[in-house]
Image (cartoon, rainbow, N blue to C red):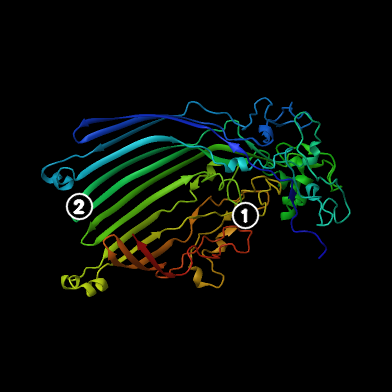
Amino acid sequence: MIGIPDSYSQSSGGFIDASAQEHYLYAQDSWKMKPNLTVNYGLAWQINGALTDHFNHDRAINCFRPGQQSAIFPTAPVGLVFPGDNGCTSSGISTGYTHFAPRLGLAWAPHASGMLGRLTGDQGKFSIRAGVGIYYNQVEEELTLQNLLAPPFALIDSGIGDIGGSPSFSTPFNDIAGRATIANKYPFTPPTPGSPVDFTFFEPFSLNVLDPKFAVPYSINDNLTIQRELPGQMILSVGYVGSFGRHLERAYELNPALPGTCLATGAACVGSTGARAQQGFFFPQNFKYPAIIPGSISAGTPNGILAFGSVGQQTTDGNSKYSSLQVSLNKRISHGLTFTTSYTYAHSEDNGSSFESSSFGTRGTNPFIDRLNWGDSQFDARHRFVTGYQYELPVPHSLTTNGALSRVFKGWRVAGNTTVQTGFPIVPSDSGFRSATCWEFTFYGCPDNPNQVAAIVKSDPRATSSHLYFNKSAFAKATPGTFGNAGRDSFHGPGVNFTNLAVMKDIQIKEQMRFELRLESFNTFNHVNFNLPNGNVNSSNFGRVTGDTLGPRQVQLAGKFYF
């Protein structure tokens, strides 16, 4: 009612003009050691060129090198450097040329006699396959997207909110209470290298930078599978599949408020969410790199405003581990029946399931003790069963010889697929700036977590009007200025259970022409598959399920003409 926006921001805009070169060389050979044993071996060499944004003449990124003065923009604050400065390339990183990736595999069809022969069956009905290899991968374009607003090549601001004031829509660079005014920052034109840029125009900085040690992600994949042909045109496979990721993409804050400093500062810092969210305005001395802008909108803060409001660094220091038992039974069509069935028991763990999951939103991690971030992957589903099937209904011979009856009774099929899976992990988190190590200018958000104070008890969301999936009393907000003890991805949400069915009828017109009618249903048994509940203790929806993933049963009639 008094004209203060909930939030206010505007920017000069920008675009991505990125490219990267990749070069692959691969050699392999096969050696048939015995008639029933083949070994495959190979070596790959690949060069993953650094992803470079060519916007603004290959310079539109930032590098952070504490103590270094930029020669490209000499008026930049110490520590902020640009492509062309010592140690800062146009991509922010260097290309590696030593990515060699060996691979080894074998296929063995042993045949035994006697009691063991019952296991292997006749010659060629039993096989053992194994393989191991290293596989590199290009980084994702999402990382380059974070450079869209790199100063001084682009501008984003919150009006007078940049120095802690309250803007209005009509006069965003004036504080609505009349405490301060700053110059209008628009229209904006990117400066040329060497020009005397006034960098206070962009402060407090919220930067994205790349780790100078940024590397190409890779995984080590291995597997061992036993296959046995069974009667009835069926093949049974039982195997172990593993994958171990190295140099995975993550992000963390290079300029956090040091743990405990806000708590030591007193009630003025820890007293409310708003105070912690604006800590860089009123207590810049709490941060690791307390470079300051003289003056402040708060007369009681002589130190001024934190200049490096945030330095979010993209890095490749993540690791992962995946192990699984995979069982499948496949039947080729015979007597009108075919199906494929698989079951997987798997466990995937990591300290950052993707760049996005380790960088954005409330994610319940501890940036100071990395071993506490090791937990289940966000996509970890411990059990998964999937089966697909089709059966052509048999027709008595007497009905197939009658032309009219044959058109009615022949060509009927029933098909479907069923999926049953346990749930993905829930992230216990807190968006209330509780640890006071981050604030509203932190580029990659605040990774705070709550305390777990009691056992987690799960319940049916349909049992209560609030649709709770777990007892909220199991968690409590951490003391301001501290991290909670709740583990990352420490428990799992509701699973998935759905079946799709179809009834199909083929109507033959000519030898190579037919018409097919299909009555199809999705989520045939109308099973509710809940979304993950909200894990943010600072949300009014904490613990609640607010939707489902698949929706209700759907039925459709379709027709196809084949010719």
Q: Locate residue 390: give its quadrant.
A: bottom left
Q: Nearer the viewer, residue 293 or 475?
A: 293
Could you tell me which residue is drawn at 25 percent across and 34 percent down?
38
Report how far apart the C-alphas of labels 1 and 2 lie in the structure: 54 Å
Q: Position of residue 466 (x, y in %)?
A: 57, 70
Between disc 1 and disc 2, whose residue precedes?
2
Look at the image and tell me whether residue 368 can be seen. no
Q: Is residue 489 above or below residue 210?
A: below
Q: Amino acid at mark 1?
A: Asp
Q: Which mark is residue 230?
A: 2
Q: Position of residue 51 (x, y in %)?
A: 57, 35
Mark 1 crowd level (few <14, some 14–19, many ≥20, 10 Å Cα): many
Give the residue number, with chain letter if any, for mark 1: 430
The quadrant of the image that shows the C terminus is bottom left
Q: Nearer the viewer, residue 438 or 249?
A: 249
Left or right: 473 as drawn, with respect to 98: right
Q: Position of residue 95 (x, y in %)?
A: 55, 28
Look at the image and tell me whether residue 403 can be seen. yes
Mark 2 falls on what kind of element?
A: strand
Left or right: 456 as drawn, with respect to 145: left
Mark 2 crowd level (few <14, some 14–19, many ≥20, 10 Å Cα): some
Left or right: 386 as drawn, with respect to 283: left
The quadrant of the image that shows the N terminus is bottom right
Marks 1, 2: nearer the viewer: 2
Q: Nearer the viewer, residue 520 or 228?
A: 520
Could you tell me which residue is drawn at 81 percent across and 61 percent down?
3
Could you tell me which residue is drawn at 67 percent across and 54 percent down?
432
Mark 1 falls on what kind of element?
A: loop
